[in-house]
Image (cartoon, grey):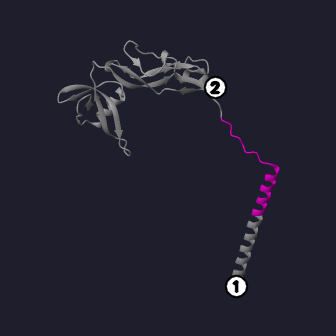
Amino acid sequence: MFAKDIDSVPITLGAHDFEKVFSEAGETSLIDLKIDGKKESVLVREVQYHPVSDQVIHISFFKVDLKEKISAEIPVEIVGEQSNELVKSGEALVLTLLNEITVEALPMDLPSEFTVDISNITEIGTGVTVGQLSYDRSKVEIMGLEADEMVVRLDVAEMAEVEEPEVSEEELVEGIEATKETAAEEGEEGAEGSDSSSKESKKDQE
């Protein structure tokens, strides 16, 4: 565990207990740690996994001051794809332009995620902007983005056509002749092999 202006403190906890809490809290919700009987409010800053077993081997907890604003990366979750008629028909695809959004707020006011509902978008090329996101603007400030910047947009679903290379008549004839020559050579080799085997067989009989 580490904090602003203090040395880090090593702690040990059960991997199963952590994974259970982390699956609900993520990196944006406060977690209460009890250390020597004292409760500390922390955020998960980093989780390291074993490259083979994929088990948690290290966690960085950041102790927060509940009265001091902090910045955090808030994930964007897209919902309503299955209800959007353009997406269902295959006319449009969902283009996510921002997967995370940086905000500044008091630790207790950090949103867990920005939920973007695209079910009611009816025109290709339109979407949801930063200014249309739903959150408490009196407590949370989005950093580094303009209100008109797109978070998600419906784009045209285009099928990529595979172009077959054009073959001239001369190339086609040459290809056929080459195939015939190869077949003839293979036939001659087979015949020679058969004659050789026949001669050897006669010698053995003599």
Report which quarter residue 106 is drawn in: top left
Q: Which mark is residue 203?
A: 1
78 magenta-colored: no
Q: Amino acid at mark 1?
A: Lys
In the image, residue 125 lies at what x, y percent? 60, 21
**Residue stretch in magenta:** 160-182
Q: Quadrant of the C terminus?
A: bottom right
Q: Residue at x 58, y 19 (%)?
A: 126
Q: Which residue is mark 2?
A: 91
Q: Nearer the viewer, residue 176 or 80?
A: 176
The local crowd at label 1, few if under 14, some if 14 to 19, many if 20 or more residues have their Cα within 10 Å, is: few
Q: Residue at x 71, y 77 (%)?
A: 196
Q: Which mark is residue 84?
A: none
Q: Nearer the viewer, residue 205 or 101?
A: 101
Q: Nearer the viewer, residue 71 or 107?
A: 71
Determine whether, in the image, residue 158 is placed left or right of residue 183: left
Q: Is 18 situated above or below 86?
A: below
Q: Earlier in the sequence, mark 1 or mark 2?
A: 2
Q: Residue at x 75, y 72 (%)?
A: 191
181 magenta-colored: yes
Determine whether, in the image, residue 105 is placed left or right of residue 149: left
Q: Is 9 situated above or below 148?
A: below
